[in-house]
Amino acid sequence: MMAVEAVPVALITGANSGIGRVTAEVLARQGYRVVLACRSQARTQPVLEAILAANPAAPPQWLALDLGCFDSVQACAAQFLASGWPLHRLILNAGQGGGRGLSASGFERAFGINHLGHFLLAQLLRERLCQSAPARVVTVASALHHRANGLDFDAVRQPTRSLTGLPEYAVSKLSNVLFSAELARQWAGTGVDSYCVHPGMVDTAVWRRVPRPLRPLLRWAWGWVPAEQGARTTLMCATDPALVGQTGRYYAREREATPSALGQDEALARALWAHSAAWTGTAGLTS
Ligand SMILES: NC(=O)c1ccc[n+]([C@@H]2O[C@H](COP(=O)([O-])OP(=O)(O)OC[C@H]3O[C@@H](n4cnc5c(N)ncnc54)[C@H](OP(=O)(O)O)[C@@H]3O)[C@@H](O)[C@H]2O)c1
């Protein structure tokens, strides 16, 4: 066990905007030292300043992280580990939708960023989380995982095929759901609980690739809510004492929910875990 720290520590990916930003700000107000792992320091700076003003006792930290690039994920984890801080909450929040092509590490873009980068980060921080137990990993997935018809382990190694990128986004979010459930099984008994979240349909930059004229329609059809509301399910999973030990569960809009049939497929989750461990070179770290 690590030395007990007076200040709990949370690392949040993609905390410079949207749901991640609100999550970091609220956790900081609750007394957490927050580490914001994001692509751009310039885009994170206003959030760091707002958090520091609210909680000067525990200055927030920015760590460079591009989830599409394994080297960047490794550097981010190494920098965090070198800080010597414990890690009580790991919030795997960052995500992109609608992009096309390959990630920097050569995987379908949404899969590489939304799933594989987070898988690698969690494996590299596993020991620190276990040493800091009780700890929690919260993975921000999406109800759009219900739209995924399967998980093709060859397709996720190819550039995005669809024109919109949305089918691939659905597969990446199915991967988040499977990963979160398998993490609960693989890490059982470590004192690190795993939760999966659908935040609702939230008015954030994640939809920036949707053509502008369509957005009012989606806002109406999907009932978009503000980021403050969208962050509530993540915050519930990160902090609610009533959820201690409820590892491996899926929550949507602040209530426990049922993932798709594929999202509950344990054999598929084990296969995804094995592939992800092999592709990220973490097979020796994963259990
Ligand atoms: N908004 C919704 O309706 C909705 C619904 C279901 C699920 N979600 C999920 O909620 C999570 C948060 O999204 P949001 O709605 O808050 O959107 P957002 O405001 O666009 O936030 C997404 C965050 O992810 C970061 N990100 C994107 N690509 C990255 C990469 N390669 N490496 C590191 N960080 C990267 C973004 O950083 P940059 O600023 O550098 O791009 C940004 O900080 C995502 O996982 C999303 O899939 C959202």
Image: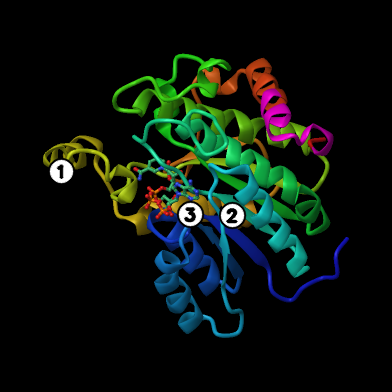
Viewed as shown, does residue 284 lie left or right of 30?
A: right
Mark 3 Cβ inside 8 Å of ligand 1: yes
**Span colored in magenta:** 275-285
Q: Earlier in the sequence, mark 2 or mark 1?
A: 1
Q: Residue at horizontal 63%, vertical 43%?
A: 70
Q: Is residue 104 magenta?
A: no
Quadrant showing the C terminus: top right
Q: Residue at horizontal 46%, vertical 33%?
A: 109
Image location of residue 237, percent across then percent down: 57, 50
Circle 3 is placed at which residue position? Answer: 14
Image location of residue 86, percent across then percent down: 75, 64
Circle 1 is placed at which residue position? Answer: 212
Above-or-below relation of 171 to 197: above
Which structural element holds mark 1? Answer: helix
Circle 2 is placed at which residue position? Answer: 238
Q: Amino acid at mark 3?
A: Gly
Q: Are marks 3 and 1 in contact (CB under 8 Å)?
A: no
**Mark 3 crowdedness (10 Å alpha carbons): few <14, some 14-19, many ≥20:** many
Mark 2 vs mark 1: in front: 1
Q: Which mark is residue 4?
A: none
Judge whether residue 280 can be spotted in this image: yes
Mark 2 Cβ inside 8 Å of ligand 1: no
Q: Earlier in the sequence, mark 3 or mark 2?
A: 3
Image location of residue 106, percent across then percent down: 55, 31
Viewed as shown, does residue 50 lie left or right of 58?
A: left
